[in-house]
Amino acid sequence: MTNRSHSFRMPDKPSLDGIEAKWVDVWDESGVYHFDRTRSREDVFSIDTPPPTVSGSLHIGHVFSYTHTDTVARFQRMNGKAVFYPMGWDDNGLPTERRVQNYYGVRCDPSIPYDPEFVPPAKPDPKRQVPVSRRNFIELCDTLTAEDEKVFESIWRTLGLSVDWRHTYATIDDNSRGTAQRAFLRNLARGEAYMSEAPTLWDVTFRTAVAQAELEDRERPSAYHKVAFHKPDGTPVHIETTRPELLAACVALVAHPDDERYQDLFGTTVRTPVFGVEVPVRAHRLADPEKGSGIAMICTFGDTTDVTWWRELQLETRPIIGWDGRIIADPPRGLESGAAREAYDSLVGATVHTARERTVELLRASGDLVGDPKAITHPVKFYEKGDKPLEIVTTRQWYIRNGGRDEDLREQLIARGRELSWHPEHMRARYENWVGGLNGDWLVSRQRFFGVPFPVWYPLDADGNPRYDEPILPSEDQLPVDPSSEAPAGYTEDQRGRADGFMGDPDVMDTWATSSLSPQIASGWERDQDLFERVFPMDYRPQGQDIIRTWLFATVVRANFENGTLPWNTAGISGWILDPDRKKMSKSKGNVVTPLALLEKYSSDAVRYWAASGRLGTDTALDEGQMKVGRRLSIKILNASKFVMSVAGDGATADPAQVTEPLDRAMLAALAEVVEDATAAFAAYDHTRALERTERFFWDFCDDYLELVKTRAYDTGSAEGASARAALLVALGALHKLFAPFVPFVAEEVWSWWQEGSVHAQAWPDAAAYRAAAADGDPVVLAATAEVLRAIRKAKSEAKLSMRAEVEHVRVSGKRVESARAATGDIAAAGRAAGIDFQATDDTDLTVEVTLSEASEG
RNA sequence: GGGCGCGUAGCUCAGUUGGUUAGAGCAAUUGCCUUACAAGCAAUAGGUCAGGGGUUCGAGUCCCUUCGCGCCCACCA
């Protein structure tokens, strides 16, 4: 509040047109959102912004959740914190590779040498992608992501995000690569990262390993095939399988140890049909007597249960599926017989699908397929971005421990989840659910091109074979390194790939292996220690509920290892955006809505209003109706502000000492409550409540208070008039600030009509100051007065009269008449009533009898 | 199979530790040029709070149960 008298500079016709461009530029020049890095940790509010994937287009869901975060950032800034609000771009990984392939019509072929003169095809032909070297491919990725990032930044600015644009990062930039490699080397040194050759979930399309967190189930049609195995005496043992093509990979049969039907088989062997391989029959608790015939074939590897059986029962290994998803050329051990070879050779090179058909033919021919396959549908594991079922292939991969095979670590990480403050609280259950259900460590290596390479080389022995157990590591000051183009210390580039030379680790890190370090990347960990100490551990991690198991969990894992703390103290989890039919909006459903047209149609503030009406953790439908409401609110703020200023007139002051009238004090008392409520709501990350309370007050302020006092306020010759004018301005200032986090453009616009500087740099309203200004004011006075006014309006409306119609007399009775009596003059003026009298009765309801004037009724 | 969330007016949603007669916006209806705003304003109508049971002086709110919807997880032969 200020006692300074004002001159008002409001336009005749306030408008939302062009308001975004105007203030985006002003904010950029004034640096109002710049982080003040002289402030110490306790005065800082730091946000670990989710880096959006720049390879896709921004959709309205981003606008939704980023607006939530921005309201928090703006509140905290006005609440006196130095807000560290950086922006990252996730330009690393498969989505970028795909977009580059489609955009330029190329594909990466690491065997091709670099061509510095390369120019992508003028007209990309998706069916004939031009092969390019890895380096050329990465250059194209860099070029395109830089373009994408510009577009994203422009949209974010238009939306009014109060990001400090001097603090941006990209998940593939030098800082991010260096940070990811440094953290990895430290994980390795402490034994938290390790290499292992093991069965791995494998996507045959992308030809890369994938992690447990990236799986999803999809219902697929399949069929049970009843197949006869044979005991040594020739009697058949029937199993049922949905994957007959893996018959050649069969290493055992398994049944439940308590299954009476198979007791005499345990410990014996049977022969596979067609291939005639002798395999043991074993007992294991995971075999389900209820499924099929109760006895199953174990293959290397049909699913993750096979892996468990294979490991726990220490079975043979007979892999038959290669990295390309086709049957490999060499038959596994045990298929040495001529007939087995011949059968196997007919499968070599076939896809899984074709191999299945051929194996079924072979089984039919040998008479070992019993009856016809029974069609079913069942869930099959897919890589979330893939479109072919995952296979399980044994490969050498890097892992980071995550508690998946270590009870102590798991408990430690669950405890971290309990330490974290979640909004909404119930999202914590998803975290615990996930961590509790992990069945292996985090597989972080990917056999892809565009990503952060592992900072590792391997010496080659005299035969040119890599010695994986003696990796060569760079020192931290060499980071970031690219082992595929730089030689390790002590070697020269011409020794690459030669006997007694070296090779670079060919893999790149999982995108989460980098983005899990976003707090360290953004905070300047090991790069800008001064900054790091001011902002880390961070305050707030906003993110989607779908990536609790990936981004959130992985970030907790990394900070736990590296910093021994939580990466932030609070997580705010957004809900989904649903399309107007309440279906989840997603690219694959094709129902994604891009934001620009909506921002232009309704204004940024209007779209923000819609977004801010959705609470954390709650799914929200895309609702243009709410945007219309937001637009109406924005226009109302413009008009009401203009009106208050014109009523108050130049030279008026927002001086609380001049507020003497009971009705004016009542309004300020109500305002104090609103400020208290909104402040508490923001502190609890409940932005919807803060908005709701502010909005409710504002509409009542316009509809009732403003109408009641405007006549009095025009009276420049009295103390009563001065009281109204001062109260109007005090409330207006508070409203501008309360609305600033939600509708920053309009709030800045109206603020600029009467104040210096940015509203976004102002101190958040202080409830105590309004309470003091309200003095003995009682909100009941405003409520009772408004009730009388409403009754007068109702009478006019029911008589189908103009609101301007004259009222002869108003009689108010009830318990609360004294509250309304204090505003007799205002009621008479606003209601155009010639006379009012009040009668105190015991009735708790306020009764208002309105006698309309003869003239009006005529 | 395990876990989480949800079910309040035609639609979208509030309803803070149990407390007058369950609220708002949109849509609908009836009106109104009213010296900020007709992209406005005023007013009206609209609900067995999913069903059943219980605790309580009192339940939309707490407990049990049934039904429906959504999401997450699960070793899915």
Image (cartoon, rainbow, N blue to C red):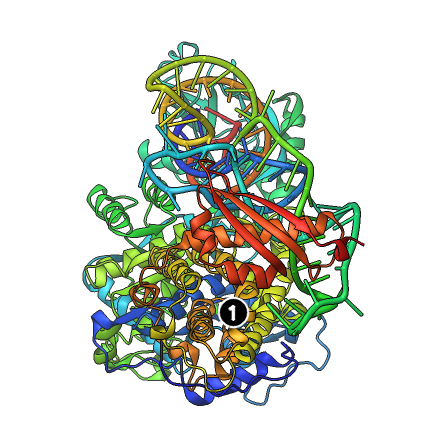
How many numbered callouts? 1
Q: Which residue is drawn at 29% across and 62% down?
A: A468
Residue A268 lies in quadrant: top left
Q: Residue at x 19, y 44 (%)?
A: A408
**Element marked by disc 1:** loop
Q: In which quarter of the image is the C terminus of chain A?
A: bottom right
- Provide the residue designation for mark 1: A743
Q: Eyeballing the image, is A207 above or below A480?
A: above
Q: Position of residue B60 (x, y in %)?
A: 47, 30
Q: Position of residue A843 (x, y in %)?
A: 47, 36
Depth check, front residue: A144 or A194: A144
- The three-letter code of the residue at mark 1 reads Val
Does any portion of residue A603 appear in the rendered image?
yes
- Relative horizontal placement of residue A601, taking residue A78 as reference (left or right): right
Depth check, front residue: A276 or A108: A108
Q: Quadrant of the N terminus of chain A?
A: bottom left
Q: Where is residue A295 in the image (x, y as percent from the top left)?
A: 46, 21
Q: Eyeballing the image, is A218 above or below A764?
A: above
Residue A275 lies in quadrant: top right
Q: Residue under mark 1: which chain is it in?
A: A
Q: Position of residue B47 (x, y in %)?
A: 62, 31
Q: Eyeballing the image, is A92 above or below A618?
A: below
